[in-house]
Image (spheres, coloured by chain):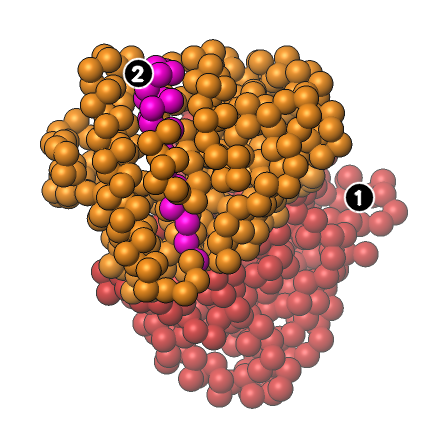
Chain colours: A red, B orange
């Protein structure tokens, strides 16, 4: 029931077309997943998400385990019910936020203790717990708990983090398999995460060890943490080919439109990033002709839409003048409308990527777009 | 083209059924108008407004003249274009906010000077300007500039305010007629406003004088400012019958579901109030069984909708647990969803009112509902 099918590989690059099948429907890859941090893509209803073409969204286990808590999500019928989203959901393991939002974590080989950034309440997360929580949330794709390292990171710490990530991956897999050994059909998938910073040898070792564990998919984690586009890309281009060809590859937390195109070219299938929504809330609109800052006075009397050819609700409905006005008076519709537009921009980007892989002219198209979208690197 | 047709009068009360025809479509009365303060019903798209059954909305001239300013609204094609709302719009005159949001107003018989509550910029509003601004905004229904008095208000001040309101009404009418003397068809309407606090004699005098000026409709203003339900109702029951039968009657800024039912019974056709949206943003949900406070822990694991029989997007889509969670984590969807539900509650109230007037059993139905909805007076 749940699984991945590789449909086509590009002749001029490592780009791939595939289908990720889940209990909540199929997803065409390469795919971009909008981020539903705390049980909602901020300000956007599931109806609006469907309208902009989102097929799968990401939920943050860390935020959900704090509020409303896994017991509550379970009691009301799972994360899909909470979010009112009937499509596929991927949850992260919580690890990234544990390390990035908390300074008082106590890390051991067994697991990690942390204090909630909301109220200081103590939590303890182990690979077993992280897996069980995501299974109980009802996620379609579950991520292994990993140790996320900052950038830069000293070599010794990086090595230890990779070993711990591998040990934790084994424990996540065991927890997952124990549950599914009792069930006929697998309706959830478990992805392993390759760590290792920008150390290519470490990435190789981590990927090889994870492959032995036979996951349903493989993520490249620990990037987009300040290493820059070139380092990121070099690491992805090194790591992606080390992963099984018949399994989906997911680059976590990436990125700009250019990052995504370059990573697709290197053979990545799945992406998530807060950029379209977070930038949207800050009045930054992605367009084919570069970014627009919607608070800018230049839009004050502009009766054209953010993007003339865009089919999103914002562009079909509102003038730039109105969007600028909404930001100017702190009206919620400002952040909502630009978030909608930006998610649509990202979804159209993915549609374009898939179309050009299918047509066989992806490599040339990607080169052009990478040049054009370089302007988005400067955000 | 623009006008009002009285369709039916209730035998058991003064309630009326009518149709308000505007250049942007017809409106069945009695009608409730959601408030679109600064060019938007806060957080709600026009698509969502249509879905909850809103037929006409209100815009605040005061807020719009400050930001984005009438020149901007005009340049981009009018208030309908700014708001992306193609249905009828009624604008208030700005008077209410000038008096309620500013302590440093300088009032004379000519007009009123005030400093913007946003940046202190000085503005001067006269009856002529208020009328011209609303005409330039492109409002379907335009309100005369009036002097709004607080409650309580000493008799001398109240008398002077009524005289000034009448003098200003004449000037608004002259400004409006001067424009329309040059046009074949009237695509806008001008309403006069009866002032006089809770002084019934003053209300009588004001109504009689306004009738002589022959407006397209008549509003009862200066209520819902702290006088209480009984005083409000006594004043409405006294004033409504003094207004021409063949013109629409609009009770400004009112009110709770009970206020509305009682005023319809007294012969009022039109209402506006921030209550459904402001309360919605504060997690207060209107239901047939009384109010729900959606931040309350009692909803934490509740998988039922806010109201089981409600057909609004919120109730069709989300659990109480999700709505509570959204308020708990400050997610925008909380205020948005409860605003949608509350506007739908008000629209269903108006549909019920119209149906029971049509069926001829309004008086009995109103008595029952007034008892049931008394709980909403305590907000």
In the picture, which quadrant includes the C terminus of chain A?
bottom left
Vertical position of residue A232 compared to residue B79: above or below: below
Per the image, is B198 magenta? yes
Chain name for mark 2: B
Residue furthest out toward the right:
A184
Q: Residue at x 55, y 76 (%)?
A: A352
Front label number (1 vs 2): 2
Q: In the figure, residue B168 lies in which quadrant? A: top left
Q: Do discs 1 and 2 share a chain?
A: no
The picture places residue A358, in percent across and down from the top left corner, at 64, 82
Question: Would you say residue A209 is visible in this rendering?
Answer: no
The picture places residue B311, in percent across and down from the top left corner, at 69, 39
How packed mark 1 is, by other alpha carbons closer than 10 Å (few <14, some 14-19, many 20 or more), is some
In the picture, which quadrant includes the N terminus of chain A?
bottom right
Vertical position of residue B68 compared to residue B353: above or below: below
Q: In the figure, residue A71 lies in which quadrant? A: top right
Q: Which residues are magenta?
A: B187-207
Q: In the figure, residue A79 lies in which quadrant? A: top right
Q: Residue at x 30, y 16 (%)?
A: B151
Vertical position of residue A314 compared to residue A149: above or below: below
Vertical position of residue B322 compared to residue B85: above or below: above
How many marks overall? 2
Query: What's the mark number on residue A148?
Result: none
Q: Is residue A253 left or right of residue A217?
A: left
Front-lying residue, B145 or B169: B169
Q: Which residue is mark 1?
A: A180
- Kind of element beneath mark 2: loop
The picture places residue B65, in percent across and down from the top left corner, at 25, 48
Q: Which residue is mark 2?
A: B151
């Amino acid at each position: 029931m749940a699984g991945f099918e590789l449909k086509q590989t590009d002749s001029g690059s490592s780009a791939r077309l595939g289908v990720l099948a889940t209990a909540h429907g199929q997803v065409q890859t390469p795919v971009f997943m909008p981020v539903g941090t705390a049980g909602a893509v901020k300000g956007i209803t599931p109806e609006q998400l469907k309208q902009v073409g989102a097929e799968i969204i990401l939920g943050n286990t860390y935020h959900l385990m704090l509020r409303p808590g896994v017991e509550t999500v379970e009691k009301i019928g799972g994360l899909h019910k909470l979010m009112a989203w009937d499509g596929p959901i991927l949850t992260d393991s919580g690890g990234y936020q544990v390390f990035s939002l908390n300074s008082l974590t106590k890390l051991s080989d067994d697991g990690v203790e942390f204090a909630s950034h909301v109220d200081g309440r103590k939590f303890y997360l182990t690979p077993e717990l992280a897996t069980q929580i995501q299974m109980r949330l009802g996620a379609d794709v579950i991520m292994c708990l990993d140790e996320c390292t900052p950038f830069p990171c000293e070599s010794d710490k990086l090595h230890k983090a990779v070993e711990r990530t591998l040990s934790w991956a084994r424990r996540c897999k065991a927890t997952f398999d124990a549950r599914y050994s009792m069930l006929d059909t697998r309706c959830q998938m478990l992805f392993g995460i390759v760590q290792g910073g920008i150390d290519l040898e470490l990435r190789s070792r981590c990927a090889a060890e994870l492959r032995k564990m036979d996951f349903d998919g493989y993520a490249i984690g620990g990037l987009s943490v300040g290493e820059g586009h070139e380092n990121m890309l070099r690491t992805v281009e090194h790591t992606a080919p080390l992963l099984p060809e018949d399994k989906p590859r997911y680059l976590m937390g990436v990125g700009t439109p250019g990052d995504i195109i370059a990573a697709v070219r290197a053979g990545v299938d799945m992406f998530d990033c807060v950029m379209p929504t977070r930038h949207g809330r800050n009045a930054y609109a992605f367009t084919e002709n570069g970014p627009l800052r919607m608070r800018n006075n230049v839009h004050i009397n502009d009766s054209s839409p953010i993007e003339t050819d865009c089919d999103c609700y914002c562009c079909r409905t509102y003038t730039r003048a109105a969007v600028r006005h909404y930001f100017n008076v702190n009206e919620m519709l400002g952040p909502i409308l630009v978030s909608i537009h930006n998610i649509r921009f990202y979804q159209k980007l993915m549609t374009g990527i898939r179309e050009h892989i299918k047509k066989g002219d992806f490599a040339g198209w990607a080169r052009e777009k990478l040049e054009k979208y370089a302007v988005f690197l400067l955000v």
